[in-house]
Image: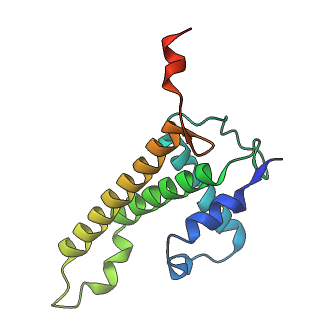
């Protein structure tokens, strides 16, 4: 059974605030935006155990919860990257004397670094275990 986009989108949206998507006028625009973020996240996932092929409704293969969480974390990294590059977030604050653009951007960058480390740690754990058990590296030595 295939995994629908919504499974990964829901995991990602649980990691960001809902009001971050308030600018979206309709669900089609949001779906297109989420798909572009998902495509960026897939590029971060180095060695998935299944092929991460997409079709019109979602993934062709069934993803485990661990794979969904890794993709959701990498989606957050992609979203933060876009947030850091976007000046739309700081424009409303130009008039305030006590606002520091550099401080806000520094906090976004630190949050992105923390999120990337978390996603990488999830991915490393994914590589070292199969079905929750450590990989049997003795198989690599041959018989």
Q: Residue furthest top?
A: 143
Residue drawn at point x = 31 percent, y = 77 percent: 90
Type of colouring:
rainbow
From the viewer's side, name the closer residue of 92 and 73. Answer: 73
Q: Is residue 118 above or below residue 29?
A: above
Q: Is residue 83 above or below residue 139?
A: below
Q: How many marks?
A: 0
Q: Image check: 106 left or right of 82? A: left
Residue drawn at point x = 71 percent, y = 57 percent: 5
What is the quadrant of residue 124 in the picture?
top left
Q: Position of residue 112 (x, y in %)?
A: 34, 60
Q: Is residue 104 above or below residue 122?
A: below
Q: Position of residue 88 (x, y in %)?
A: 38, 74
Residue drawn at point x = 20 percent, y = 85 percent: 99
From the viewer's side, name the closer residue of 28 and 5. Answer: 5
Q: Image check: 45 left or right of 112? A: right
Q: Position of residue 21 (x, y in %)?
A: 55, 76
Q: Image check: 141 left or right of 63? A: left
Q: Residue furthest left?
A: 97
From the viewer's side, name the closer residue of 143 and 48. Answer: 143
Q: Residue furthest right?
A: 1
Q: Is residue 43 above or below residue 77?
A: above
Q: Position of residue 134 (x, y in %)?
A: 52, 38
**Quarter in which the C terminus is drawn:** top right
Residue drawn at point x = 66 percent, y = 35 percent: 50
């Amino acid at each position: 059974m295939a995994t629908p986009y919504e499974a990964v989108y829901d995991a990602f949206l649980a990691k960001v605030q809902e009001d971050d998507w308030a600018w979206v006028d309709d669900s089609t625009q949001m779906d297109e935006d989420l798909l572009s973020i998902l495509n960026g996240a897939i590029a971060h996932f180095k060695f998935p155990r299944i092929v991460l092929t997409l079709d019109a409704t979602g993934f062709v293969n069934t993803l485990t919860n661990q794979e969904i969480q890794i993709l959701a974390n990498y989606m957050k990294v992609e979203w933060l990257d876009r947030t850091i590059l976007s000046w739309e977030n700081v424009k409303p604050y130009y008039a305030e004397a006590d606002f520091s653009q550099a401080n806000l951007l520094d906090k976004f960058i630190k949050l992105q670094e923390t999120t990337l480390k978390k996603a990488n740690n999830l991915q490393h754990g994914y590589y070292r275990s199969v079905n929750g058990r450590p990989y049997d590296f003795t198989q690599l030595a041959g018989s």
